[in-house]
Image: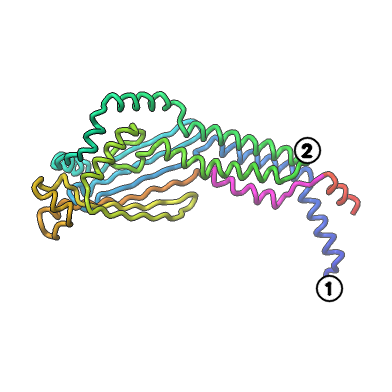
Amino acid sequence: MSRTSPLMREGALSRLGSLRRHPVVAFARASLVVLIALNAAVSVWLIAEFEGQYTEGPPSPARFYVLAGVDDQYTMIDVSIENSTRLLVYQLIRDDVAPEEGDGEDEGGGDDGTSDTSSTTEEEPVNRLDRARTWIQVTVGLLILLEVLVTFVGISGWFRTAGFLAVLVAFLVVLPLAFIGDNPNFADPGSTPNSAPEESAEDENDEQGAFVHEETDFGVGLRYGGFEVSMMYAGYDLGLVEEDNRSSVRETPPEPGTKDAASYVKFDSTLSLRFGPSVVLLLVLPVLWLLAPSGRTHDAALDESE
């Protein structure tokens, strides 16, 4: 049996290395990198889904489903509600719980509230998603420029790596945070997405005062192309309890089977954020750089001398 000599093996590896650094291969790699980066810049970036359902209490089995998509220009949000009649009846039969004295004092300053809303509406045109879009476009353009410089000028590949990390931070960190910052009520079934922050804050304060003996559960898991957050909220709604019994329900949970126990409401929901296929495809770029590394001028001269 013939064995390959070490010299022949080194010669084959040297020819393979010179082929991987061939100008034609480098040009093909750079073209592919540019196409992948441009495709990610103009495609769907983020897909957000929220699904929530009342599993116990009068509003069950009312279900919410919200779907949102973010690309380089627009943010599209679609909201659908199933068994909305149960939710409407629940809102009609429950009583408004009187706010505490501290809350009443805050509500008295109506002029301050209107001034705050006017100031927020003035700042609304410059939102976080627009800044995130600008950051993504700048980082993608910088990555393309660095790829061209590495391929045809011969600068260090570490600059390209830094540009790639900046693109990942823009897509994986800046974009989700900007979406949540501009849509704080996306996962709030009590209000619609893009509603006024002041209104959502007031609703949240009312709900915190109306629900007692609250239970919450929170979990985070990974999924293909993103992550998923599961949430659970439960408590006794004082709006469903007779006014004379509310003080006792505030102190201790009602006994099972009693009339006041029917005020127990439970809501289960999941929020998933996943990135578009073109964004996930960006993870192929490091593989391309490993398969077809960029050759320096002195490396090519060294290969020719060998």
Residue depicted at x 46% and y 46%:
274
**Where is the C terminus found, in terms of image quarters?**
bottom right
Looking at the rendering, which quadrant does residue 186 occupy?
A: top left
Q: Amino acid at mark 2?
A: Val
**Where is the N terminus found, in terms of image quarters?**
bottom right
Residue 222 is covered by the magenta coloring? no
Q: Does 203 sit left or right of 243 as displayed?
A: right
Q: Position of residue 156 (x, y in %)?
A: 75, 44
Main secondary structure along the magenta-highlighted residues: helix
Q: Secondary structure at mark 2?
A: loop
Please rate how many residues cluster around mark 1, counting C-alpha atoms within 10 Å: few if below 14, some from 14 to 19, many from 20.
Answer: few
Q: How many marks?
A: 2
Q: Does 157 sit left or right of 236 as displayed?
A: right
Relative to 196, is 100 above or below? below
Give the residues in magenta.
Answer: 277-296
Residue 294 is covered by the magenta coloring? yes
Res. 2 mark: 1
Q: Amino acid at mark 1?
A: Ser
For marks 1 and 2, give the CA distance.
Answer: 44 Å
**Which residue sits furthest bottom?**
1
Q: Does 51 sit left or right of 284 as displayed?
A: left
Give the mark, 1 or 2, whose residue is nearer the N terminus.
1
Q: Position of residue 175 (x, y in %)?
A: 49, 40
Q: Position of residue 99 (x, y in %)?
A: 20, 39
Residue depicted at x 17% and y 57%:
252
Relative to 171, is 110 above or below? above
Res. 153 mark: 2
Front residue of this view, candidates 146 and 84: 146
Q: Position of residue 295 (x, y in %)?
A: 78, 47
Please rate how many residues cluster around mark 2, counting C-alpha atoms within 10 Å: few if below 14, some from 14 to 19, many from 20.
Answer: few
Residue depicted at x 27% and y 40%:
205
